[in-house]
Image (spheres, rainbow, N blue to C red):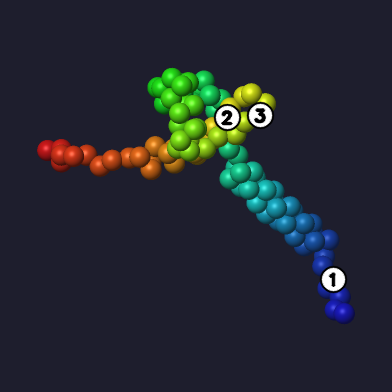
Amino acid sequence: MEVVMLQTEAFDQFRRDTFKFFHQLLTEERQKSTVEWLDNKEAAALLKVCSRTMQNWRDEGLLGFSQVGSKIYYSREDIDRMLQKHRREPFKALA
């Protein structure tokens, strides 16, 4: 087993750098995993459709959702994905 000796100042700097690295890593990971959830009313307002249309899209499997009790939630990511999947190119090139 090898023993490494560090001066107190070098050890303190190493400790600060390591703490800073892990703090930055955790912050980035939290930002990645943050999901924006919209309830049924918010999602319908965003898409400018009625709640019945939202129900139809859920029934047809067009839009993923989560349900907690009687409350329905949609992730903004699922809404964006559905819109992108149904995107159509313009029929006519703009001049």
Q: Mark 3 points at which residue?
A: 68
Q: Which mark is residue 73?
A: 2
Left or right, 26 with reference to 1? left
For the residues bearing labels 2 and 3, Cβ distance under 8 angstroms: yes
Position of residue 18 relative to residue 87, above or below, is: below
The quarter of the image holding the C terminus is: top left
Per the model, the C-alpha gap separating discs 2 and 3 is 8 Å
Q: Which residue is drawn at 53% across and 24% down?
A: 40
Looking at the rendered structure, the kind of residue marked 3 is Val
- Among numbered discs 1 and 3, the one appearing first in the sequence: 1
Provide residue 68's location: percent of width, then percent of height.
Answer: 66, 29
Kind of residue at badge 1: Met
Furthest residue toward left: 95
Label 1 sits on residue? 5
- At horizontal 50% and vertical 32% (from top left) the residue drawn is 58
Left or right placement of residue 30 versus residue 55 in this view:
right
